[in-house]
Amino acid sequence: MNPGLVVGIDIGGTKIAVGVADMEGRLLKTHRCKSHEERGPDPMVADAVSMVKKALEEVGGPKARPLFAGIACPGPLDQKKGIVLSTPNMTNWENYPVVARVEEALGIEARLENDANAAGLGEALYGAGSGKEFVAYFTVSTGVGGGFVENGKVLHGAQGNAAEFGHTVVVPVGGDICGCGGAGHVESYASGTAIQRRARERLRKGAQSLVRDLVDVDEVTTRELAIAARKRDPFALSCFEEAGFFLGLGIVNVIQMFNPNIVILGGGVTNVGSLLFKPVQRTVNERVMKDYQGSFTIEKAKLGDHVGVRGAIGVALNALAGKGKRQ
Ligand SMILES: [Zn+2]
């Protein structure tokens, strides 16, 4: 008897990862490769499909056939049509019908989800938010993404674009430009790109710091800033203080809008640990309405590199459960 398998596919500008899981979402096999996104979407999907087929064969032999595939992709997307509308970091993905392509290649149904929503779902179901009813998720890396999960279901909103926490406004007038083209957003101050840009600007104006001994000013990234901050370099510490402050403001807004049990912070920048978490926690403690205090925790994401694939698997299992209810 076929015990039931589902597939998760996580496509991004840097890497493509796939996984095969059982009906409880337990990951049985994963594979990954570099995206080489400059090739455009068809070769990337072909790589994903061949890795899925390999993983399926390794898990269930040559006849293994999954029930459903979940796909996580950077947005914005048209989730209902299964189309990627545009992706600034992936070439020629405009209006690309990724769901149709995956369905044709694997011969099963697929469902598409925005990558941050999928990651939030993964953390809510299998990671730091496991067992929690209301989960807010922030991913802090090149940009700042968000997702909100209620009782194991992603909050989508009217167009599928709910919970873009990185693009909430924290500086109403004269704020820094954001990756989305807006200004004064959380992402304008707290993303890895923003931390690095603001640090370089201050260094060019003459700020003193240990990072000057590590690399040229124009090459300073969050990595060098973290090294210097761990040596208590005041400039580097202030860079993370500032990012944590603005991220903390975004979190205060989310707590007061959604009343989550947990706020999970994931993404590469959160690997700096307490350098970011301390100012975040302090800002939230100082600013959140007292009625909310003690009702939530702020925690680091747990799934690491597997978050996208685990999230895509959650998307597949939720889609299957939804189909069951409609029948
Ligand atoms: Zn923005």
Image: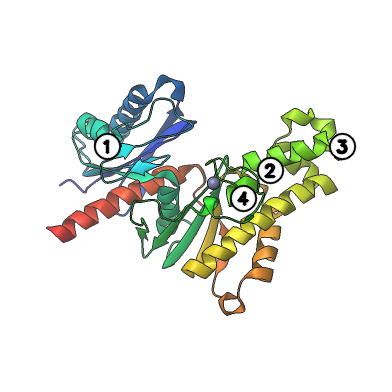
* Residue 293 horizontal/vertical position (percent): 60, 75
In the rendered view, how is the structure colored?
rainbow
- Label 2 and label 1: CA atoms lie apart by 35 Å
Q: Amino acid at mark 4?
A: Gly
**Residue furthest to the left:** 327
Residue under label 2: 195
Give the mark, 3 or 4, whose residue is nearer the N terminus. Answer: 4
Q: Amino acid at mark 3?
A: Gly
Callout 3 crowding tier (Cα within 10 Å): few <14, some 14–19, many ≥20:
few
Residue under label 4: 184
Eyeballing the image, is 214 above or below 222?
A: above
* Residue 164 horizontal/vertical position (percent): 47, 52
* Residue 98 horizontal/vertical position (percent): 30, 34
Residue under label 3: 206
Residue at image x 85%, y 32%? 213
Residue at image x 53%, y 49%? 139
Res. 99 mark: 1
Eyeballing the image, is 62 above or below 20?
A: above
Eyeballing the image, is 238 above or below 224?
A: below
Is label 1 in a helix, a strand or a loop?
helix
Residue at disc 4, CB closer than 8 Å to ligand 1 = no
Is label 4 in a helix, a strand or a loop?
loop
